[in-house]
Image (spheres, grey):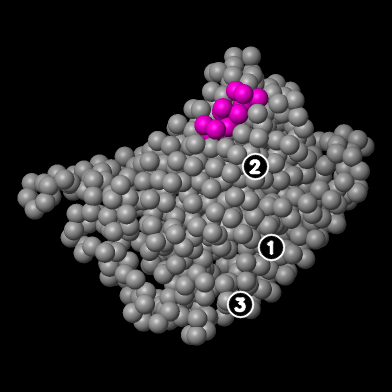
Amino acid sequence: MRALDRERTVASRGYSRWLVPPAALAVHLSIGQAYATSVYKNSLIAHFDTGQTQVGVIFSVAIVMLGLSAAVCGPWVERAGPRKTMLVSAVCWSSGFGVSALGIAAGQLWLLYLGYGVLGGIGLGLGYISPVSTLIKWFPDRPGLATGMAIMGFGGGALVATPISNQLLGFYDPAYDAGTAGSVASGEALVGLFATLGAGYFLLMMMGVLLIRVPPEGWLPEGFDPARTAKAPLVTSASVSASNALRTPQFWLLWTVLFTNVTAGIGILEHASPLIQDFFRDGGTTAVTAVAAGGFVGMLSLFNMAGRFVWSSASDVIGRRPTYMLYLGAGAVLYTLMATAGGSSMLLFVATACLILSFYGGGFATVPAYLRDLFGTYQVGAIHGRLLTAWSAAGVAGPLIINAFLDAEGEPGTLTQSAYHAPLFTMVGLLVVGFVANLMVRPVAERFHEPEGRVPAAGAAPPDTDTGPAPGEGASAGAAASDSAALRARRTWLVASWAVVSVLLLYALTRILSTAARLFTG
């Protein structure tokens, strides 16, 4: 088990930092399945003969555990290192599916709360923050690009899981048809689905565990000058601990920024299908079919995923605070435009909603780089974990705001554009609050910085030390032939790992574009 220790995961000579993004993507594409639970929700309701609320609690527990585990275990993640943390995440995430499969087979709903909710939620939290923290350390020159690549995987995970889950349910239950309204899969099919997903995700996440490394002490990318970067606005070369970060106003201002941005995005994402149908309803009938509404949901998912990479990468150029000014300021304008004129044009409505969702995804991907700018890389994973409690809070607040207003307006299926004025303008107000909080962010005061000499080194091994049995590292020490073989192996793993995650992302992209086309073809 020593191979899991942080000291044993320090990269040896010749390790390519471009092996870290596919390692992170392998984890985030797996845990991103959390946003695909709607695929089998009705089947679970039918199998347990219960209501939507009882089954929906499973997802809620998982998201709450994500925030709690990320916040509580953040300091341990920094001490233990990414390989051990990602392994624990893989075990918890896959075990959650296994326990849930047992619960379905036994007819015990509480086992799904324990399995997918608690165990899976812990796997979500640990798996979310660990690779992101490591990427920031490997890409000090482009932290937005690096975190955008990984967190894009979380958005893409649901796009991969949705069609695969439907195909697996159809394989285990030939009578199930995902395209037929009201069709539900059998309990045996659900057991097969959860067992297969648990095993598949474990294998994919283990690829990330094997590939992941931390940079050696003193390592910097070629041509990177930390002194020049530190002169940029709000960027520090100092280090702030997770405990000290909680004492700074900057942390709570960013908590507010993330909370408002996520709450506004969830307001559309959680209610996407009925939203577009209600906006184009006239005289009790809607011009948007259920199939076309599904295409709209697909478009939102695509922009949510793309925004995580595009906007986060752009923040490396324009800066983190200006990027959030765009998310929050332009988001408020777009929400106002949607509320007042969205129902006049399908193109206008879809364009505003898609841009809002791109800001929603971009907000998740940019915030780790924002934290790195303000607090340094010392315990950025732990700080990020604690900031994610804003996500948990927004996951509760967003749907409550929308649903509370709509419940007061009338029954589902009878609402029109006017029913959405109050909730949408409430989102505008929240975004304005976030915009002001972002403007108030200033550099962290020196009294919160760690004294020089107290910050531990990035790794315990020098750059030319062999650090374990991971793929492509080579097993013998010293011989030129072994070094050459190790280099070829590294290149093989570089190509293979990127091929695996690229195929999954291209699969998701192809499926989502084919679904989104129905929005304009019916």
Q: Is residue 393 left or right of residue 367?
A: right
Q: Is residue 163 above or below residue 256?
A: above
Name the one closer to the observer, 129 or 235: 129
> Is residue 270 magenta-colored?
no
The percent coordinates of residue 64 (x first, y second) are: 63, 51
Furthest-top residue in this view = 175
Earlier residue among tags 2 and 3: 2
Frontmost of labels 1 and 3 is 3
Q: State the SS at label 2.
A: helix
The residue that disc 1 covers is: 260
Q: Is residue 79 left or right of residue 33?
A: left
Label annotation for residue 249: 3
Name the one closer to the observer, 304 or 184: 184
> Which residue is at a point 41% across and 69% down the rendered structure image?
378
Label annotation for residue 59: 2
Give amino acid for label 1. Answer: Thr
Question: Which image quarter holds the C terminus?
Answer: top right
Name the one closer to the observer, 502 or 347: 502
Labels 2 and 3 touching (C-beta < 8 A): no
The percent coordinates of residue 478 (x first, y second) are: 8, 53
> Is residue 104 magenta-colored?
yes
Q: Which residues are magenta?
A: 97-107
Q: Is residue 373 above or below residue 451?
A: above
> Which residue is at a point 56% across and 63% down the rendered structure image?
386
Give amino acid for label 3. Answer: Pro
Q: CA distance from mark 2 to mark 1?
A: 21 Å
Q: State the SS at label 3.
A: helix
> Which residue is at a point 23% across and 45% down the rendered structure image?
469
Query: Where on the picture, by quarter, is residue 226?
Result: bottom left
Give amino acid for label 2. Answer: Phe
Estimate how packed mark 1 is, as few (under 14), some (14 to 19) or many (20 or more) residues with alpha carbons within 10 Å: many
Q: CA distance from mark 2 to mark 3?
A: 32 Å
